[in-house]
Image (spheres, rainbow, N blue to C red):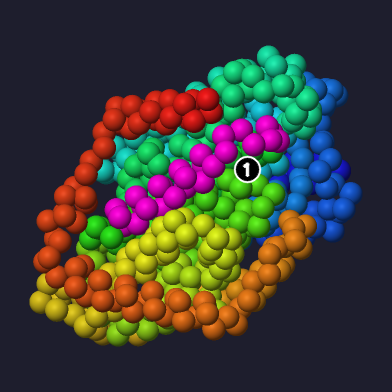
Amino acid sequence: MITYPLLMVFLPIISAIFIYIMGKSWANRLVFATQLALSLLYLQLIAIFPVLNSKSLVIGDWTLQSGIALKIDNLSMAFIGLAIFMWWMVILYAWPIYKKDNKFLFFLLFLEGTFLGLLMVNDLFSMFVFIDIITILSAILVVYKKDGWSLRSGLYYLMINSMGMLTYLMGFVIVYMLTGTLNWDLATERLSVLPLSPSIYAAYILMSASVSVKAAFFPTFNWLSRAHGSAPASISALLSGLLVKGGLYAFIRIQELFSRPMMGDFFFHLGLITALSGVIFALSQKDIKQMLAFSTISQIGLMLMGISQIQTNIYYGGLIHLFNHALFKALLFLGAGILINHYKTRRLTQIRGVFQAFPLLSVTLFIGMLSITGAPFFNGYIGKYILSTELASKPLYFSLYHLVNLGTIMTYMKFSQIFFLPNEESKPFLPDPKQWGKMDRPRHIIPSLILAFSCLFATFGFSFLGNLVQADFPTVRLFSATKYVHWSLTVILAYILTKAFIFTDRITHILHAIREVKIPFYHTAYMFILLLASMLVFAW
């Protein structure tokens, strides 16, 4: 039974090595064969899942207590499916650009194998190893353009994430000292019978803080905007749509490891602060990729508000939003990449006339924008419906949550100026009108079309995710007049505020000041220490 999980990990890694060694164009096509094989393996895993479900599979002749173990449960099955789908989209998008670049394809496939390993690993040390490898490979792909900005961003990303993983290392050493094992299930079982002590709190704080860096929680989120902004569009889509979710996945696993409430609502409040700060920075941006990157931080905050409350209905709201966000944010990043390639600029005010030049791509972008704002009949509505419903009994949190949603709608109203008619500033960047028909052919935007369809399908097929994770999702009323009216009123208010403040010079100086905030690495390191200290104070 262990053969299938091992194949999921090593098949893309071995294919990546073969592609790199051969260095031939024909060998590069192996990426499609590998993805097809992974897809078929996943279907086979679904077929045998009742037998594999939650069983620890130890590699070699080692005991469960000391060996490297893999485990596939409902949550990891859902994440594996999402990962394979997202890699399909990225490969389809990147192929016309990198089909002759064996190094890029090597790193991309190697990263896929390690990420799938992260989703199936069931011992604390192997999770540390996989996250470290993912961090190194991601940093290489961030700097792949090899210009000054990408090199600085990649180094920043590598350093801050390495700092986080050092705290994880210290945390799981404490867990090992307390339990005598690195196996996730055995450690969970033994920790549950130990009385709460400073050692247990220290392990929890160190491990939770480490993944807070990987998932870009406040106040250490600054690496994300740098990495997303400088990476190729395909890697930005992968980072935002999936890899940052690896940190959230690890966060959920750590909550399960300690199996009891440790710090009350600390992470709920941290998620709220992350969401508010992300949307403020997103509103101030003029760079299309930076806007999408900070918007990701805001949405991560909403996810954290949900998944921090395990075994409650709001948890499912955060979890559903996590999966849906992967679809519409990848769609928006890939669309932005296409526009940047043709307009040769990333400035929103210089990208105009998109609807005339790219009518089909524009439709997919509209779907992505409506999805992220939680519009009815789009997949972002599902998770936000649950979050909103569960927060309705808490007026302060309910108001702040809708303030975040208001800011999100305003952000994408600002984003929507790319559909305005060209002006004097944008005319020098406008693609040749003679090429418009050739640029928007369906085969050029296949990933965007698939992702747009997925956003619509996920709205009505979200129960499929519930079946996959064996969860009893809260009831979601897709036809709720109250929610429709509330969303419409929020859109009207967002339009008024955007028209009055964002598209005028009233607060330009404030937005400029926010946009120009640069946080050097040592300041981020101090803020990480402050996060650790605040968690320690909150625990006591």
Magenta-drawn stretch contains 277: yes
Residue 522 shows in this picture? yes
Image x and y of residue 471, in percent? 74, 58
Residue at x 25% of width, y 71% of height: 497
Picture quarter containing residue 337?
bottom left
* Segment tinted magenta in the rendering: 257-282
258 or 292: nearer the eye?
A: 258
Residue at x 75% of width, y 37% of height: 70
Where the N terminus falls, by quadrant? top right
Task: Report which residue position mark 1 lands on.
Answer: 252
**Disc 1 packing (10 Å; few <14; some 14–19; many ≥20):** many
Image x and y of residue 229, in percent? 32, 51
Residue at x 70% of width, y 36% of height: 259
Q: Where is 221 relative to 510, above or below?
A: above
Residue type of the residue flagged with mark 1: Ile
Residue at x 54% of width, y 83% of height: 481
455 or 440: nearer the eye?
A: 455
Image x and y of residue 469, in percent? 73, 56
Q: Where is 414 relative to 293, above or below?
A: below
Give the prevailing secondary structure in the magenta stretch. Answer: helix
Magenta-drawn stretch contains 295: no
In-image side of 489 versus 32 (left or right): left
538 or 126: nearer the eye?
A: 538
In-image side of 486 versus 321 (left or right): left
